[in-house]
Amino acid sequence: MELISEYISKYGEKFLEFLPSIITSLLILFLGLWFIKILRRFARRVFTKREMEPTLEKFLLDIIGWTLRILLFVIVISQLGVETTSLVAIVGAAGLAVGLALQGSLANFAGGVLLMIFKPMQVGDFIEAQGESGTVKEISIFYTKLITINNQLVILPNGKLSNDNIVNYTSEGKRRDVLTIGISYDSDIKKAREILVNLMKEQEAILKDPEPVVFVGELADSSVNLSVRFWALNEDFWDCHFYIIEEAKTRLESAGITIPFPQRDVHHFNLDKFLEEK
């Protein structure tokens, strides 16, 4: 009993000495968790006001939350008298090892963050990048998914995508088409231009401003190449494109304007006759 009493007295005194640190640590813990909660709410309001992508918003909120919790944990255990230098060194070494092992994934992650912040494209846009063309189906943290015109799924890593050229065909709402139509040197250029201009003006889907134009773009080897240019809304672009190509050929031929095509004359060489003449 005397031994038990001695232990109680000895460690009771130490507990009482340590009690203020415990109370202070618990107070710091509860106040820190409350502060983190308030800060996350404020960050969420800022992200929502800036219309940030939901995927990026959730990810950044998680990063902020876990980073602040780790810092709070270090502060609390240091308040309790635990040496944190070794712990920080271990965490740093582990982070470096993980970073080296996941270089490609981290590059894709960084690229995804940049794409979501600067928004060079959005879901539904038709783009060309990394040698692929298609409609953006999904932009995630690591990869971007495209649906090609042949209904094929293409998955592009965000790391390369964010560091390469991206051609966004739909971001401006309208597009200009440039067609080259060749006519023979014997054909009437003014008449051909008039037919093509009237053809484009007849189409309601082709915009009147900017006005469609036709001009001589090149004097080629076997044809006079007319450059046919018009503007159309994104949703009408391809319908106008294919219609103008087909209808231009029909109307030009009906007006007697020749559309030349490459021809090659093949002459048969008579070897026997050549030898007799020699």
Image (tube, grey):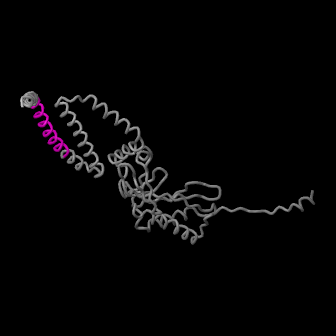
Task: Determine the image quadrant of residue 270.
Answer: bottom right
Name the foreground residue: 77 vs 103.
77
In-image side of 119 versus 228 (left or right): left
Quarter of the image for the N terminus: give it: top left
Q: Position of residue 81 (x, y in %)?
A: 18, 29
Which sits in the foreground, 50 or 12?
Answer: 12
Q: Is 36 included in the stretch rendered in magenta?
A: yes
Outermost residue, front side: 1
**Residue 44 at least partly seen:** yes
Residue drawn where x is 34% and y is 36% of the image: 94
Number of numbered callouts drawn: 0
**Position of residue 110 measured from the top left corner of the image (x, y, whole percent):** 36, 43
| Residue 235 as seen in the image, left or right of residue 17 | right
Magenta: main secondary structure? helix
- From the viewer's perspective, is 192 left or right of 115? right
| The quadrant where residue 11 appears | top left
- Does the magenta run of residues contain 152? no
Q: Residue at x 59, y 67 (%)?
A: 257
Query: What residue range appears in magenta?
Result: 17-40
Q: Is residue 111 above or below residue 270?
A: above
